[in-house]
Image: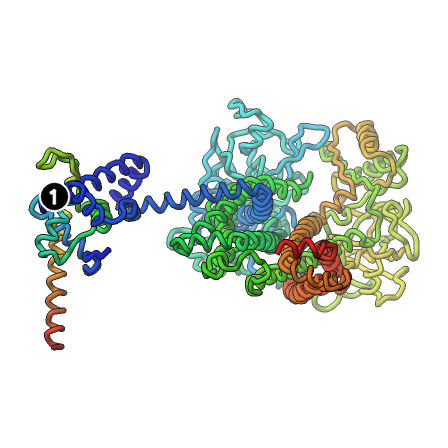
Amino acid sequence: MLRNLWSGLAGLLRKEQVEREMDEELGEFLDAAAQENMRGGMSRAEAARAARLEMGGMEAVKENVRAASWESRIETVWSDLRFGARLLRFNPVFAGAAILSLALGIGANTAIFQLIDAVRLRTLPVKNAQEIARVAIDQRNGASGNFSTRYPDLTYAMWEQIRAQQQGFSDVFAWGPNLFNIAPGGEVHNVQGLWVSGDFFQTLGVEPVLGRLFTAEDDQPRCASPGAAISYSLWQREYGGERAVLGRTITVNRHPFPIIGVAPADFYGVEVGRYFDVAVPLCAEPIINGEDSQLKSRSGWWLSVMGRLKTGWSAERAAAQLRAISPGVFEATLPPDFNPSRAKHFLQYRLGVFPADSGLSDLRKDYEKPLWLLLALAGLVLLIASANLANLMLARASAREKEMAMRMAVGAGRGRLIRQLLAESLLLAGIGAGLGALLARNLSRVLVASLSTQHDPLFVELGTDWRVLGFTTALAVLTCILFGLAPALRATSVAPGLALKDGGRGSTQGRSRFALRRILVVSQIAMSLLLLVGALLFARSLNNLAGLDAGFRQSGILVTDIDFTPLNLAKQARLAFSNDLLKRVRVIPGVDAAAIAAVVPLSGNGINQDIFWGDAGEPEGEAPTATINRVSPGFFKTLQTRMLDGRDFDEHDAANSPKVAVVNETFAKKFANGANPVGMKFRIRRLKTVSPPYEVIALVQDTKYGELRENFQPIAYLAIAQFDHPGTDAQILMRSNAPLTKLMSAVKSTANEVNPNMDISFVTFHKMIEDGLLRDRLMARLSGFFGVLAVVLAAIGLYGVISYMVARRRNEIAIRVALGARRESIVKLVMGEAGVLLGVGLVIGTVLALAGGKAAASLLFGLKPWDVPTFVLALGLLALVATAASLLPAARAARSDPMEALRQE
Amino acid sequence: MADKASGLVQGTLDMLILKTLELQPMHGYGIAMRIEQISKGVFQVNPGSLFPAFRRLERKGWLPSEWRETENNRRARYYALTGLGRKQLKGETQEWTRQAAAIARILEAES
């Protein structure tokens, strides 16, 4: 085998020598044969002639010998490819169009697939990723407490229990993502932070490139001076990759941490789609978060626990063990302030084990489905483009029919000719795929960038692995077969005699040769209708979201967060301090209105609490809940939320005056059965304690609370001045028409006048809401792009086929015109043909779109996938474009001079 | 062009070539002549089948070749048999004998 390969390769390289030796050997054979003949009594000339006759054609023998070796196959393929390349060079327009459309199609598909591969298919870049699993509560519904970080699976108390009692994992670790402000003072500089337990890096098998990473000793309760591990990229970005970074300090929320080590470049954490810059041990959390620390709070959910399964332990076995210890774990970690019904619920929780070999990702949850859908759309575009190419190749095939017939007549095998024709397609597909792969690298990066926002930067490792390569290759082969095979079979299926006899008249071609092209065009129209419907659905859905009345003004609002934690103000001084800030902000020139809110609408934060309607008694069973916001006077005026009845909060609603609340319409519907709730009372239960009664002083219109897509929720607005746990920051919303930069610098200098030692960050309300619609915008844009592309491609396809039809029936049309047919009737004739194709395509496309719409249903807002106006619009648009595309050749046919056509006969 | 060698059972040409070379290395024409002579002219081997067969066998490592002087002072390519080739020949001969005997038995039974 090896020898065979070796001599084959040697044969390829020493081709000339092999040829020469073969010549010599055959010559020797002839000589020997001739001499033998002469011995039999022939003359020299006679003997040589007889020997040659006996041998047969010298070239034929040589060809036989050559064919016995496999390397000759390669040579034929090579020469086929060269021949194909030459043909393509003669048709630069065809080649260019083909390669461009393939490169675009394959590029778009590969780019999307690359993203899917990165967020869904690839495993974590750690040692033996398949052993990594996640420990979380199986079906945790109705949990309550403070949920911070992106993966609030468990509390710290639970983590301690799990670490002590689990048996299925050789190592377990806990971690949670967070934003860390690493600016030593002044304007906030947030980077991606991680809380990690001491075993984090060791369990994952991550080795430092510099210094050391944490061990269990770094994560002891009440660690006095913990270190920080930084990522490779932060090391490069902020410290220029200097080795002297060890021993320097980095401040996290103004607390200094010595840098102890740098993680390797390819390690981004266990969260796909994100990266980390700084990691600190869990025990440092109280230092950084101060009085908001979650560590000791039993209702503080902020950790995700993962581990490496012991050899011999399956995930099921580890889960069974965790289930067995669950009652004890939850008994030991029950938050003491839970009321009985909550506690009962809590104690029924059971731990489970979930696969995590490809890490965790909220990105995956949000984008996996849209990405597969986009891949399907891009795949359709590629199919339409392939159909166009197939059409072009068919046209070329019929033009080369005589050439093929001639070659078959002189003895070329059909298989050989098909191989040669396929080589040309292969060349196109290969070049297209190569360019497409290059394009994909940029496209996927653009895609990721378009999903990143300033406050939520994404990081996706977009390497090209065997899956991506395989995908692209498969696409190339598939398209090649799609557009190359049918025309090749077609071109060589002629009986040579017939084709040669058919002396130049196009009109005698059978209808069946044309049928394939019609089928192609019909399917193109059907597929492009599908894409067009998809594009319009997503565009209308985005339009619905953007044009939605959220109940407040979205533009011209600046959200400023002034964090005065560094000032270490006592609790009772904080309200007055933030009030003072608000007053100063209100007088900044250009600020029309300003207010403080605990929850900025649509920021994703939220408070949800039990409501007891009335001023006495407790309901049986589960209490109904409402969302809560705490706001200062002027909040509704700032956001221009309409007040339907009653009055706004004012300065008389202070800490020691009667508690008051403003509620929205949905709240009134839910709790007061739709009656005007002004003057009515309710109480709020937070865990075990029930508040004194709140009197409703106003009714406001409904507003969105968490996100635009949700239904209106019942909201109770409480006076922030009456809150007894004021935090150490003030979120000030201000409405202004002044330029943003001017406003921001004015706010900064105002804050600096009060105290220069505060952290300030800004976000515009409008931008924040827009960022919330990122996925919808992506779907609308990309599907719109694919839809337009599809319609253009289908129009080109239809144009091509109708033009071909007109050319084919040129004589017939000429005769009709000569016999007095009117131009209109010629146009009608051609358009009739186009209309049949269009009609069939549209019907099939409608059926497909109705069936395929289901896949998009969950991504749409405010309309169903069978939205009638969308279908009408799509059908109308496509019909219009298609009619225009076929009208051109029809008009040309009608204008043609009959004499000219007939003279050519 | 009548090629009696094509009447050979598929694959037997290879065996005949190996057999011919069992005694001594030979060149192409010699091999063809030997097969013709020993078969008393029943098999006339055409170069069109002979040389591809050489390439095939060479590839399998049964039939190395070298350029040598002939009896009448000319250069010719001589083919020889390797140990592997001998083993192959032995195996093929046995198989052939077995099959030929079986076929003969069947034919006798029929008649």
**Of residues A136 and A65, which is closer to you in this image?**
A65
Residue A733 seen in the current view: yes
Q: Is residue A859 shown left or right of residue A584?
A: left
Tell me which residue sits at (65%, 47%) in the image. Answer: A148
Identify the amino acid type marked 1: Met
Farthest residue, direction left? B23
Position of the C terminus of chain A, as image quadrant, is bottom right
Q: Position of residue A285 (x, y in %)?
A: 60, 39
Q: Position of residue A384 (x, y in %)?
A: 60, 55
Count of numbered marks: 1
Q: Residues within 10 Å of mark 1 (few under 14, many from 20)?
A: some
Residue situated in front as seen by the camera: B43 or A701: B43
Image quadrant in which you'd find residue A20: top left
Color encoding of the figure: rainbow
Q: Percent position (x, y) of residue A844?
A: 65, 66
Element at badge 1? helix
Residue A637: x, y in percent?
89, 47
In screen coordinates, is A710 left or right of A371?
Answer: right
The residue beneath circle 1 is A38
Which chain's residue wears label 1? Answer: A
Residue placed most toward the observer, B3 or A269: B3
Q: Is residue A536 visible?
A: no
Picture quadrant of residue A833: bottom right
Against A267, residue A477 (above or below) is below
Is A440 rendered above or below residue A384?
A: above
Answer with the quarter of the image where residue A686 lies: bottom right
